[in-house]
Amino acid sequence: MLICPSSKLTVTKVAGLLCASLLVCSAAASLAEDKAPAPAPPASASVNLALNKKFVSTSPNKYKWDGLTDGSWVPTAPTCYATDQDDVFPKSVTIDLEKSSKIASVVIGIPAFGTTKNVEVSISTDGTTFKPVGTNQFEQRKEVKYTYSFPAADARYVRLTYKDHWDEQVNYPKEYVFTEEVEVYAPTK
C-alpha cells in the first residue's frame, strides 16, 4: 500500500523511518541525561570578571593546559587548566582581575578525568593576604560545575588552592589536577 504515490513511500518505509527517528531521539535524550547542564551563574551576574584575565600558578603545566580563564568549558588542552606532575600539595593558581571589584560568587568546572579533590577559593585585594570564601570536595570521574557563593566582598585576586588529590589515577598521573574554567561574578541585585 502506497502512502504517497509520487514518492513511493509505503507503510513499511514510513514505519522504518519513524523507528530510526525514535532511536536517534532516544540516544540524544540518553546523552543529555548523562551530561545534564550545570547550573547557570546568578541571573543578574552577566559579566564574567575573570574572562581572559592573567593568572599565576605555583605548579605550571608545561604541556599547554592553560585555559583557566579563556571562556571555554571544553575539557581538553589548551582550553582546560592543569597543574604540573609534582607530588607537592597544596598547589594554587591566582587570577588577577586587574582591578578591585565587589564579587560574590566563583564558578569552577572540574572534568571527569584527573584527580582533582578538595579545592579552596580565597580572595584578596592586595595579592598577599587571602581570605578563604569556600571549599568543595569534588567527586572523581564526574564532570562538575560548582558555584562558591559568599557574602559580597572587594577583591582583585581570586585564588584556587588544590589541597590534595584522589589516590586513584584517571587517564593522567594522579599528581595532575585539572580545572575546566573559572568564572567570577559580582553580587546579584
Image (cartoon, helix red, strand yellow):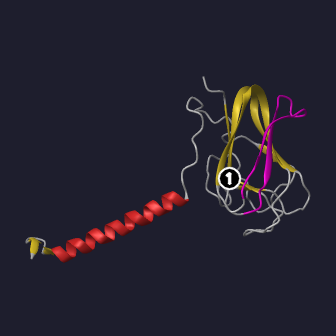
| Category of crowding for the residue at label 1, using alpha-carbon neighbours closer than 10 angstroms: few (below 14), some (14–19), many (at least 20) | many
- Relative to 154, residue 11 above or below: below
Query: Is residue 1 within the magenta segment?
Result: no
The residue shown at (57%, 29%) is: 44
Quick one: quadrant of the C terminus?
top right
Q: Considering only vertical position in the picture, is 65 above or below 159?
A: below
Residue 187, horizontal then vertical, whole percent:
66, 27
Q: Residue at x 23, y 72 (%)?
A: 15
**Element class at badge 1:** loop
Asked if the stretch drawn in magenta spans residue 133, the answer is yes
**Label 1 sits on residue:** 180
Q: Left or right? Give the position of 145 relative to 57.
A: left
Report the residue at 68% width, 60% height from top.
77
Q: Position of residue 92 (x, y in %)?
A: 84, 48
Residue 99, image x, y percentages = 75, 28
Q: Amino acid at mark 1?
A: Glu
User: Which residue corresponds to the image point at 71% horizontal and 40% vertical from the top-left?
Assistant: 53
Residue closer to the observer: 88 or 136:
136
- On screen, 151 above or below 50? above
Magenta region: 114-139
Could you tell me which quadrant the N terminus lies in?
Answer: bottom left
Residue 108 on image: x %, y %: 69, 46
Describe residue 1's horizontal placement relative to residue 78 as left or right.
Answer: left
